[in-house]
Image (cartoon, grey):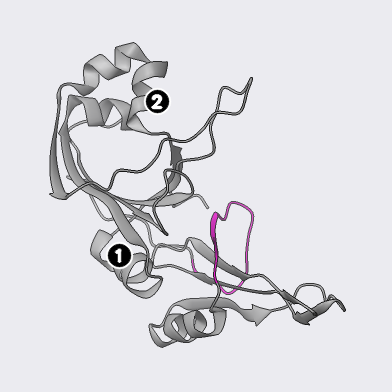
């Protein structure tokens, strides 16, 4: 979607190895830890691969506290770190000037991969564009996908909080070998980003 800036971010250590010049610039940044950082095992590289599994998807949000009410409080993700950044280095990586950043990364379990970043820029000029709305999906939409083992409870919480629903839990393809069919549901977060929850089916004995 054109009014949502979503990026995929590698760990800072990987950036320092891949781009020494950028790592030197980053020393001009100031960072304040708002929470103690949770140490996670590093991502493993497959033989012959220049990339490891994706560390996280990052959403640049309009209001980080509003976003945390969903991802942390309703969906139950736990903070890996929560930092406030300012300075030349953080502006260099973002292509910005004079802006500051609060960066919160949330995880399910303790893992260095598959996490979600909730980032807010400060010192922006003017109001941000309104978030995408609508109960359908469109070209340019971005979705984050989470497995769940309690899709009905999650759906009730999401509906009660007033998020825009795309679909309640549905079975995409009936499988006769399943005692309980696989289910998926989808909704939009406060910034219009699609969130897809997926529950695996239960095979017959």
Q: Classify mark 1: helix, strand or loop.
A: helix
Q: Position of residue 185 (x, y in %)?
A: 60, 74
Q: Residue at x 31, y 55 (%)?
A: 128
Q: CA distance from mark 2 to mark 1?
A: 27 Å
Instruction: Give how far across and how far down residue 25 sits, in percent.
Output: 23, 18
| Residue 173 position (above or below residue 22) | below
**Residue at horizontal 53%, vertical 53%?**
1
Q: Which residues are magenta?
A: 133-148
Q: Residue at x 55, y 84 (%)?
A: 152
Mark 2 or 1, closer to the camera: 2
In the image, residue 88 sits, relative to residue 33, either above or below, namely: above
- Near mark 1 (Cα within 10 A), the count class, few <14, some 14-19 or many ≥20, is some
Residue lying furthest right: 176
Question: On residue 156, which mark appears?
Answer: none
Q: Where the C terminus falls, by quadrant?
A: bottom right
The residue at which mark 2 appears reads as 14
Relative to 34, is 108 above or below? below
Q: Of 131 and 156, which appears nearest the observer? A: 156
Characterize the magenta stretch by its predominant secondary structure: loop
Q: Secondary structure at mark 2?
A: helix
Q: Pinpoint residue 138: horizontal percent, then vertical percent.
A: 63, 60
Q: Quadrant of residue 17?
A: top left
Between 136 and 181, the one lying in front of the other is 181
Name the residue beneath numbered marker 1: 68
- Report the side of 132 relative to 198 (left or right): left
In the image, residue 196 lies in the stretch drawn in magenta = no
Q: Nearer the viewer, residue 29 or 108?
A: 108
Relative to 61, 151 lies left or right: right
């Amino acid at each position: 979607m054109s009014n949502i800036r979503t990026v995929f971010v590698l760990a800072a250590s990987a950036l320092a190895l891949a781009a020494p010049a950028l790592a030197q610039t980053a020393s001009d940044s100031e960072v304040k830890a708002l929470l103690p950082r949770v140490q996670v095992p590093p991502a493993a590289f497959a033989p012959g691969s220049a990339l490891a599994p994706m560390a996280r998807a990052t959403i640049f949000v309009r209001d980080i506290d509003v976003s945390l009410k969903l991802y942390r409080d309703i969906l139950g993700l736990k903070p890996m770190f929560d930092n406030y950044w300012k300075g030349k280095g953080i502006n260099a990586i973002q292509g910005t000037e004079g802006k500051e950043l609060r960066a919160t990364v949330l995880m399910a379990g303790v893992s260095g991969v598959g996490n979600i970043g909730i980032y807010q820029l400060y010192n922006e000029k003017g109001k941000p564009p309104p978030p995408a709305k609508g109960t359908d999906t469109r070209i340019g939409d971005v979705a984050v996908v989470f497995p769940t083992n309690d899709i009905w409870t999650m759906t009730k919480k999401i509906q009660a909080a007033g998020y825009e629903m795309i679909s309640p839990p549905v079975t995409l393809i009936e499988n006769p070998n399943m005692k309980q069919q696989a289910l998926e549901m989808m909704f939009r977060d406060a910034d219009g980003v699609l969130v897809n929850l997926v529950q695996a089916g239960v095979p017959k004995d």
